Image (cartoon, grey):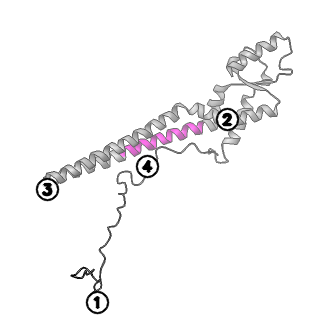
Amino acid sequence: MTFLAAAGVPAAAQDGQPPFVGFPILTLDQERLYAESEAAARIIDEIEQRASELASENRTIEAELTAEELDLTEKRETLAPEEFRRLADAFDEKVQRIRAEQDGKERDLQTMRDEERQLFLRRITPILAEVARERGALMILDRRTVLLSAETVDITEAAIARIDAVLLDADGNLTEPLPASPVERPADLLNPPQPETEPEDEPETVSPDAPAAPEDETPADGN
């Protein structure tokens, strides 16, 4: 938007053309678009809700792992050293796996939070393009990049209304869900399923009434 403003507006002025004649331009206030749109507020609320869910999930996992560690410590006196070491190593491996998974969720959520404005802009770009086509405009500029413009070319109010109408349903929920939440906890996070083992081949049973298999007999004379 800044590039278009710098390249297009001075050119129109140098040509001495009347404003916006043959070069339709619209403006909008991006700050108001993000601050006043109900759809933008819903995106922010959704991200914060996921952050709250992740914090609650981490507390639950921490409590369960603490209880498991205490139980393992209490069993130490009754277990052989080799058995206790095996269980302790398995527990440490589980803690490291869960920590890596939860840290990954934290990073994904932080990335989404950092990019929430870009996420909003990506969603509204087709909507703004539709508004521009309806009004015969070739470009939309951020008002902050424009030195002077007529109020009639500002579409901020109309854009907010259109964005909320498209991105929100009748109940005020986003019509297009955000990307899959990284904070959903699988039911088997703490106790993942063990890999299935192939059943061992059972020895072939021979009926007691079955005749014995004939043995290869070689005549003593070799014939």
Residue picked out by circle 2: 124
- Single out the mark in the foreground, 4 or 1: 1
- Single out the mark in the foreground, 1 or 3: 1
Cα distance between the residues tagged 2 and 4: 31 Å
Amino acid type, label 1: Asp
N-terminal of the two: label 2 or label 1?
2
User: In this rendering, would 63 be left or right of 71?
Assistant: right
Q: Secondary structure at mark 3?
A: helix
Cα distance between the residues tagged 1 and 3: 51 Å
- Residue nearest the observer in this picture, 181 or 39: 181
Q: Secondary structure at mark 4?
A: loop
N-terminal of the two: label 2 or label 4?
2
What residue appears at the point 50 percent right and 38 percent down from the top-left corner? 48
Point out which mark residue 78 bears. 3
Q: Is residue 76 visible?
A: no
The residue carrying pointer 4 sits among few (fewer than 14), some (14 to 19) or many (20 or more) residues within 10 Å by Cα, namely some
Residue picked out by circle 1: 209
Does 31 sit above or below residue 88?
A: above
Q: Read off the magenta span.
A: 41-59
Amino acid type, label 3: Thr
Cα distance between the residues tagged 2 and 3: 64 Å
N-terminal of the two: label 3 or label 4?
3
What residue appears at the point 30 percent right and 46 percent down from the top-left corner? 93
Q: Secondary structure at mark 2?
A: helix
The residue carrying pointer 3 sits among few (fewer than 14), some (14 to 19) or many (20 or more) residues within 10 Å by Cα, namely few
- Residue nearest the observer in this picture, 200 or 193: 200
Amino acid type, label 2: Ile
Q: Are marks 4 and 1 in contact (CB under 8 Å)?
A: no
Q: Position of residue 148 (x, y in %)?
A: 75, 15
